[in-house]
Structure formats: structure tokens, C-alpha cells
Image: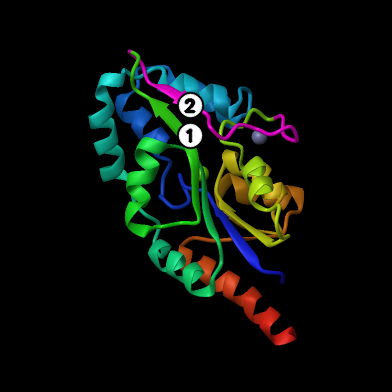
Amino acid sequence: MTKPVIFCDFDGTVTESDNIISMMEKFAPQGWERIKDQILSREISINEGVGKLFSLLPSKIKDELTEFAIENAKIRPGFGEFVEFARAKGIPFYIVSGGIDFFVYPILEKYGPFDGVYCNESDFTDERIKILWPNECDSLCNNDCGCCKPSIIRKLNTQENRFKIVIGDSVTDLEAAKHADFVLARDLLQEKCVEWGINHQGFTSFFDCIEEINKRIEVDELTC
Ligand code: MG
Ligand code: ZN
């Protein structure tokens, strides 16, 4: 195995459930589920759907919303240990998230620093919440991803061709998984990896991720 690099999703991966969904369940007016279903069935792009969802919410609830997200987020067991593991092994660790800055950064704060945290941004200056997209698709991707994980992977992997490990669970990880050398997957992502024949392994906790990556590193050390 060439030197590894980790690209890890946030919502539903680092945290046990999807923070955007939890926030909408609590704060959004009726009808938001339809937008969610359209995103999951890929009827509308993630970019369009997430923008629509947040435009349902007034900017003045920013503090309440942030507090709720931070208090509600349950970190998947073993995440702290996994970050330590990557650090000890010298494996670059990037968070690539379709989530939004105002909850991603505070929830991750005590685990960092990371080699990079990529997510969407928010603007609370108008009456309704606006989502900004600093990581849009490059010329090689036309999925209107919002936060384009394949574009980020391409940008970060230009220097050396590392063994790319993608960790994730859902619709924002599908395109990234196609670019991975190995995927640690849950839920929808796991189903798609099976369907598409992508090299992957399922996981429940980050202790599983440590074990799976360790196995591959050990094999490599033995053959060198
Ligand atoms: Mg996710
Ligand atoms: Zn894209």
C-alpha cells in the first residue's frame, strides 16, 4: 500500500445521525421532508436541496439552532481514538462534509487540528438562512454537489498519489467513493459500494476503522 490518506465525512459518520435532518425535524415548517426525499432520491441536487432546506429557516434563530446542533450531536464511538491513531501513524486526515460551518467546526473543535476541514458556509445576514458553497465542483464533476468531495480529493492529491481511504455513509459520499482506493462505509454508501463493486468494508464504530486500516498497513509492512 502506498502512503494512505483519509477523507472522512461528518454527518452520519463522525456524528451518529445527520445534523441537518435533526435540525429540520426540530425547526423547519411542514413540507421540508419532501425536499429531503428529493435529495435522497437524487431528483434534485444536494446543492439545490440543502439551500432550499435552510431557506425555510429565519436567520434570527442562529444561536438557538447552533446550540441545538452542538448539544444534539452524538459522536460515533472511537472517533477520538481514530484521530489519535491517524496522527500517530502520520496519515493525513481530512474532514470533507456536506454539513455547514456553524455546527461542523464547533462539534469538531476538541478533536482537531485536522489537516483540513471542508464544508459549506452559512450567511445569517438576510431574513432567511443562506448557504454558501466555497467547494463547488471542478470542471471534471457535473453533479452540482454543493461541497464537491471528488474535487477536493483531486485538489489535495495532486502532489503524490496516495492510497485514498474514504469514510462515509450516504448520498454526499457516493461520488467520492468512486475515487477511493478503499471505502469504509455505512448505510446507503455501503449498499452502493456492493452494487458498484467498490473495494470496501462496513463499519459500526471508529474502532472498526482503526482495525481495518491497521490490517492493511500491517500487510504492507510485512511485504516491504
Ligand atoms: Mg454523511
Ligand atoms: Zn461535484
Q: Which mark is residue 164?
A: none
Residue range corresponding to the magenta coloring:
127-142
Residue ID for mark 2: 132
| Badge 2: residue crowd in 10 Å (few <14, some 14–19, many ≥20) | some
Q: Residue at x 71, y 52 (%)?
A: 158
Give the colouring mode of the picture.
rainbow
Q: Amino acid at mark 1?
A: Asn
Q: Which mark is residue 120?
A: 1
Q: Dots 1 and 2: beta carbons under 8 Å?
A: yes
Q: Residue at x 39, y 39 (%)?
A: 19
- Judged by its main secondary structure, the magenta piece is loop
Q: Relative to residue 215, is residue 75 drawn left or right?
A: left
Q: Residue at x 67, y 83 (%)?
A: 221
- Give the percent coordinates (x, y) of residue 73: 33, 46
Name which of mark 1 and mark 2 comes first in the sequence. Answer: 1
**Residue 115 sits above or below residue 135 on the image:** below
Quarter holding residue 47: top right
